[in-house]
Every structure is written in C-alpha cells, then in structure tokens.
Image (cartoon, rainbow, N blue to C red):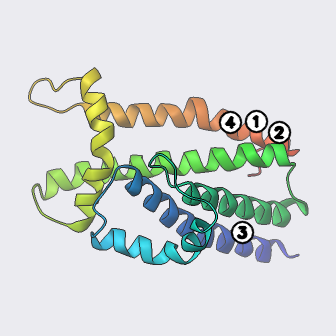
Amino acid sequence: MSPYLANAGEYLISLLFLLYILAVMLRFLLQLVRADFYNPVSQFLITVTNPVLRYLRRWIPGYKGIDWPSILLLIVLQGIELCLLALLKTGGIPAVSGLLVLIITHLLKMMIWIYLIVIIFQALTSWINPGAYNPVTVLMYQLTDPLFRRLRRLVPPAGGLDWSPFVALIALNLLLMILIAPLQDFGNILAGYPIRIL
C-alpha cells in the first residue's frame, strides 16, 4: 500500500473512532457525575450513543451507579481502532496482553485530556464572559465540580482565589507524564513493538 494512502487511512480511522469514543466517554463521565440529563448537549450525546448502548443494556446491566455497557463499548471501540491502526502500520494485530494495556492507556489518556481541555476552557470563559449561561458551560461546571470539591479540601482557597483548577491542571499533566507515557510504552513492548507505534 502506498504510504500516502496508509497515512490517509490512519487519519480517517483515528478521526472517526476519536469522535465516537469521545461521545461515549463524555456520556459516561456526565452520567457518573449525575449531570443534567435534559441539557441539549447531554441529549445530543444520548441520541448519538443510544443505538449501540440500548442493545448492550439488554445483556449487561448497570451496577452501583456505574454504566458498565458504556465501559464495555469504550473498550471494544478502542480495541478495534488500535487493531486497525496496527494492521495499517505493521500488517498484523498486536499481542492480546499489549492490546489490553494499550486500550486502558488510551482511554485513561482521553479522560485526562477531556478534563484538561474542560478546565482550561472553563478558566477562559470565566475571565472573558463570567456568569453567562450556556448549556456547554453548565455541563463543564457539573463535570469538574466533584473534582474541584475534593481538591479544595486539600488546597483551600487563599487570597480570594480558588487554586483547585490550577492544582488539577498540574496533577493531570503529571499523570500524563508519570503514568500514561510509561504505560503506553509498556503496552507497545507487550504488543511486540520495540518503539511506540500505538
């Protein structure tokens, strides 16, 4: 296969899976924090993800407030994406042990990046247009509030400033460096790749 076609294929696969995995991940996180079900953004995510999740819920129930069908769907989608990318890049699929580690790593990385982007966007909107109502900003607040409440117990507001977003950004970036990067390298090694391919 031409390297140009392979690059185009990788791009399309990554983009399509990213968008759908992102929708399922956001739905899962918003359900976890009990965000507003009737918010237009929530309704859009439900509409996009319901066809598959409705089928999975026939066989796999939620348990203790955790949406296990969403977790299974995330794992399956991420696994398919990684296998397709591996086929394009190496001509084969990764070893199962490495694939499992890579699936978990990629999903954790996406979750961390969601929080990083939401916190930065939240900070920008609070400076540019504080107090303005918007369905997106409402969901961002509902998503980050449980995290910020926990951090405020460790780092209470000082000097009239809430330091919890700043602490969260530092902690999330550290997680990317000291947890996600080594896990990804370890997953690639288990998968049979001497360098980071996936």
**Disc 3 to disc 4, C-alpha distance:** 22 Å
Q: Which residue is mark 2?
A: 189
Q: Dots 3 and 1: beta carbons under 8 Å?
A: no
Residue type at numbered disc 1: Phe
Q: Dots 1 and 2: beta carbons under 8 Å?
A: yes
Q: Dots 1 and 4: beta carbons under 8 Å?
A: yes
Nearer the observer, 156 or 127: 156
Secondary structure, mark 1, is helix
Q: Which residue is mark 3?
A: 10
Picture coordinates of residue 121, whole percent (x, y): 30, 54
Q: Which residue is mark 1?
A: 186
**Disc 3 to disc 1, C-alpha distance:** 22 Å
Q: Earlier in the sequence, mark 3 or mark 4?
A: 3
**Disc 1 to disc 2, C-alpha distance:** 5 Å
Nearer the observer, 14 or 79: 79
- Tell me if mark 3 has few (under 14), some (14-19) or many (20+) residues whose alpha carbon lies within 10 angstroms of its own: some
Q: Dots 3 and 2: beta carbons under 8 Å?
A: no
- Please name the residue shown 9% across and 56% down the image: 131
Q: Which mark is residue 183?
A: 4
- Tell me if mark 1 has few (under 14), some (14-19) or many (20+) residues whose alpha carbon lies within 10 angstroms of its own: many
Picture coordinates of residue 71, whole percent (x, y): 58, 55
- Name which quarter of the figure residue 18 lies in: bottom right
Residue 45 to residue 161: above or below: below
